[in-house]
Amino acid sequence: MKEVIEKLNEGLKDPEYRQGWVANIAMAQLDNERWYREKHNKVGKYLNYKDRHAIANLGAEYFLELLSK
């Protein structure tokens, strides 16, 4: 596993490759915020710490799901 992480870190030195990762992580978060707001009737409403924490976890899980496909 260490070798895989080292290869990934090496690849992330390439600005274009890195931007792809950044965009995918960001979109996983944004998508999950939208879905969370819709599901919990919070469109246009304030998100408290509990909401933001839930969205962060959902976004991370979603990203990992996409990564493992």
Image: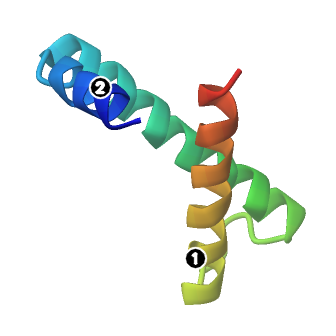
- The amino acid beneath tag 1 is His
In this view of the protein, which residue sits in the foreground, 4 or 20?
4
In front of the other: 48 or 62: 62
- Using residue 29 as the reference point, say whether residue 69 is left or right of it: right
Q: Quadrant of residue 28?
A: top right
Mark number for residue 23? none
Q: From the viewer's perspective, is the residue at label 1 or at label 2 nearer? A: 2
Neighbours of disc 2 within 10 Å: few (<14), some (14-19), many (20+): few
Q: Is residue 23 left or right of residue 8?
A: right
Which residue is farthest bottom? 49
Mark 2 — residue? 8
Residue under numbered circle 1: 53
From the top left corner, tell me how far across and down residue 62 is, in percent.
Answer: 68, 44
Q: Is residue 52 above or below residue 4?
A: below
Q: Secondary structure at mark 2?
A: helix
- The reply to whether callout 1 and callout 2 are in contact (CB within 8 Å) is no
> x, y (%) of residue 58?
68, 58
Left or right: 31 in relation to 38? left
> Looking at the figure, which quarter contains the C terminus?
top right
Residue under the point 36% across and 27% down:
4
Q: CA distance from mark 1 to mark 2?
A: 27 Å
Which residue is depicted at the point 54% across and 87% down? Answer: 49
Q: Amino acid at mark 2?
A: Leu
Residue 37 quadrant:
bottom right
Quadrant position of the N terminus in the picture:
top left
Q: Which sits in the foreground, 40 or 43?
A: 40
Q: Specify the quadrant of the image occupied by residue 26.
A: top left
As drawn, 39 above or below 9: below
